[in-house]
Image (cartoon, rainbow, N blue to C red):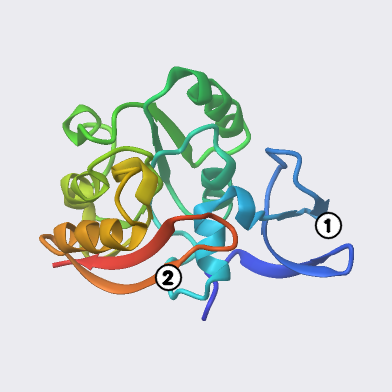
Amino acid sequence: MSLPDGVQRREFQGESALATRGDPVYGEPVVDGWRRWDPHRSKLGATLEAGLETGLSGGDGVLYLGAASGTTVSHVADFAGPTYAVEFAPRPTRDLLGVAEDRGNLFPLLKDARRPETYAHVVESGLDAIVQDVATRGQADVALSNREFLHDDGRFVGAIKARSEDVTEAPEDVFERVLDRLRDGYEVLDTARLEPYHDDHLAVVATPR
């Protein structure tokens, strides 16, 4: 498994961990300018720890859906190019704005990821990657409605949260159903469960079809 340019394994108190270069955001350890990327607080970090080949590269143009207060998207912006961060809730967006102050390539958008038409005039098309971490029912629909921003060989890297779809259904059944819907517009390249970092989550790497 290859890491994106700008993501490395570094030593933190004798332990090897993922890291990116940038200003700290959430109290994470920093050694020689490298920030530890905590997979317990980041679905994408956990996806990389799971060994999935994400296809992400240094300098990528990225649309990040479900940016919250900026924990993961700050790491993405450390190694990527223009990074558009969509978050629906005003409170975490205020924190996200603070994160963006130190990262000129990070563009916070207080928008609903289920309505890409509301930010299509801001986000460029032909992006290299969509990274998705939204806690809402219809996660595949969000991915499908935003695929217009990807170029033909771009990558979708998402985390499916079973409990956001249906708290009564078995996670395995939820994942199968969401993947079936996702295949309406994507070719699924790889998947992996995100335990022990995140319970009842499935990481997905896909490309538009």
Is the residue 30 above or below the residue 2 in the image?
above
Residue beneath disc 1: 32
Mark 1, other Cα within 10 Å: few <14 / some 14–19 / many ≥20: few
Closer to the camera in the image, 67 or 100: 67
Using residue 188 as the reference point, say whether residue 67 is left or right of it: right
Q: Determine the secondary structure under disc 1.
A: loop
Mark 2, other Cα within 10 Å: few <14 / some 14–19 / many ≥20: some
Distance, label 2 to label 1, CA atoms, is 32 Å
Location of residue 32 (image quadrant): bottom right
Location of residue 95 (image quadrant): top right
Q: Quadrant of the C terminus?
A: bottom left
Using residue 58 as the reference point, say whether residue 118 is left or right of it: left
Name the residue furthest left: 184
- From the top left corner, tell me how far across and down residue 187 is, in percent: 19, 70
Q: Is residue 84 visible?
A: yes
Marker count (numbered): 2
Amino acid under disc 2:
Ala
Name the residue furthest bottom: 1
- From the top left corner, tell me how far across and down residue 83 is, in percent: 43, 45
Name the residue furthest front: 168
Is the residue 112 above or below the residue 149 in the image?
above
Is the residue 7 above or below the residue 107 in the image?
below
Numbered badge on residue 86:
none
- From the top left corner, tell me how far across and down residue 76 is, in percent: 52, 52
Residue beneath disc 2: 192
- From the top left corner, tell me how far across and down residue 121 is, in percent: 21, 32
Closer to the camera in the image, 49 or 201: 201
Q: Residue at x 16, y 45 (%)?
A: 145
